[in-house]
Amino acid sequence: MELSAIYHRPESEYAYLYKDKKLHIRIRTKKGDIESINLHYGDPFIFMEEFYQDTKEMVKITSGTLFDHWQVEVSVDFARIQYLFELRDTEGQNILYGDKGCVENSLENLHAIGNGFKLPYLHEIDACKVPDWVSNTVWYQIFPERFANGNALLNPEGTLDWDSSVTPKSDDFFGGDLQGIIDHMNYLQDLGITGLYLCPIFESTSNHKYNTTDYFEIDRYFGDKETFRELVDQAHHRGMKVMLDAVFNHIGSQSLQ
């Protein structure tokens, strides 16, 4: 068993309150290494003969080049949880994995105080709240700089011809803009689209706009706030929602914010 590939972090995308007192617990392992994983879990402040109140088998939900990713959904009627992973590999080795790392699978270690991961307080405000309409929406994701050039007057200096064959870089510009999206609204409607997901449109020095420099301004090469308002109005008129990709994990190095 490749112990160094095993990874979990509480209070992250690996352990979070989903909805209706349901938790999603995830763990990463080496690809093809693990045969099964059980999650032992319970309320850490209910002292019982069996330290964990329940056990549930995890499901492998996806695999990449290097790792497998597992998940289980558990319900909790209390505002906290303690949990421990039991992993069995393809050769029959069996270990426990918790806050103190990987240890031998034994009753002593299973019940040892401090071995389990903990989420000390769960509050409904932290739960993922997905609006009902989202699951019924047919989404179309748009990378604005590459969708359509609707206003050549906004083209950055050095804008390439639309059919240019180049190896893409972050500073290649073809002149795609918000007007280009507006001009294709009927096309999108004919496809049956009911939701537009726009990659970042805020001011930025790159073509992808994920290095935002000003969250309060539309990028000048895409248009302005009035043009964006028209885009939203045109979408709503056709029964389409508009969702923006806003990057708050980081900002551009040239941002004054």
Image (spheres, grey):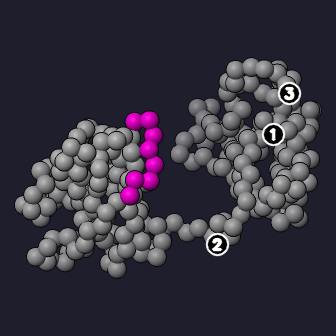
Q: Which residue is labeled 1 in the image?
A: 147
**Which residues make up the magenta segment?**
59-66
Assign a secondary structure to mark 2: helix
Give coordinates of residue 74: x percent, y percent: 36, 69
Question: In the displayed structure, does residue 189 sit left or right of residue 74?
Answer: right
Image quadrant where residue 218 sits: top right
Type of the residue with mark 3: Trp
Assign a secondary structure to mark 3: loop
* Distance between the alpha carbons at the discs numbered 2 and 3: 39 Å
Type of the residue with mark 1: Phe
Residue 105 visible in this rendered orientation of the protein: yes
Q: Which mark is residue 44?
A: none
Image quadrant where residue 84 sits: bottom left
Q: Which tag, 2 or 1, sits closer to the chain's start?
A: 2
- Image quarter in which the N terminus is found: top left
Tell me the residue at 29%/47% (across/down).
Answer: 34
Type of the residue with mark 2: Asp
Q: Which residue is labeled 2 in the image?
A: 132
Number of numbered tags placed on the structure image: 3
